[in-house]
Image (spheres, grey):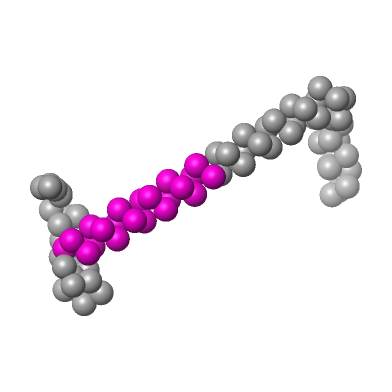
Amino acid sequence: MNVSLTPALEKFVQDKVASGLYNSVSEVIREAIRLLISKEAVSQERINMLNRDIEIGLADMENGNYRNGHEVMRDLIAKYE
């Protein structure tokens, strides 16, 4: 596999190898890919949690468990004045 990097990214990778943190360019690239996989997993989990919260909120609304937004804001303003 061949990978093309911008000059700035190539310098970044080379600097990581030169720092001694990594033994090769391949190690830096593998670590970057592992971090990207991890980041995507965290993002997907956040989306899943948000979808669950939305479903809970919609179910609450269907069951009449909600308050008017204007009432909530009025109560918050009164509480913190």
> Which residue appears at 62% of the width and 38% of the height?
50
Above/below status of 54 relative to 15: above
In percent of width and height, residue 26 lies at 18, 61
Taking the image as drawn, is residue 5 in sight?
A: yes
Q: Residue at x 18, y 72 (%)?
A: 23
User: Which stretch appears magenta?
Assistant: 25-45
Q: Residue at x 50, y 42 (%)?
A: 44
Q: Name above or below for residue 28 compared with residue 3.
A: below
Residue 78 vs residue 48, the one in the foreground: 48
Residue 57: x, y in percent?
74, 32
Asked if residue 29 lies in the magenta stretch, the reply is: yes
User: Where is residue 25 drawn, in percent x and y?
Assistant: 16, 63
The residue furthest front is 1
What residue is drawn where x is 87% and y is 25%? 64
Q: Is residue 70 visible?
A: no
Residue 17 in percent (x, y) is at 18, 70
Prevailing secondary structure of the magenta residues: helix
Q: How many marks do you count on the picture?
A: 0
Side of 40 relative to 56 (left or right): left
Figure quadrant of residue 65 = top right
Relative horizontal placement of residue 81, taking residue 16 as reference (left or right): right
Residue 41 shown left or right of residue 46 in the figure: left
Most extreme residue toward the bottom is 20
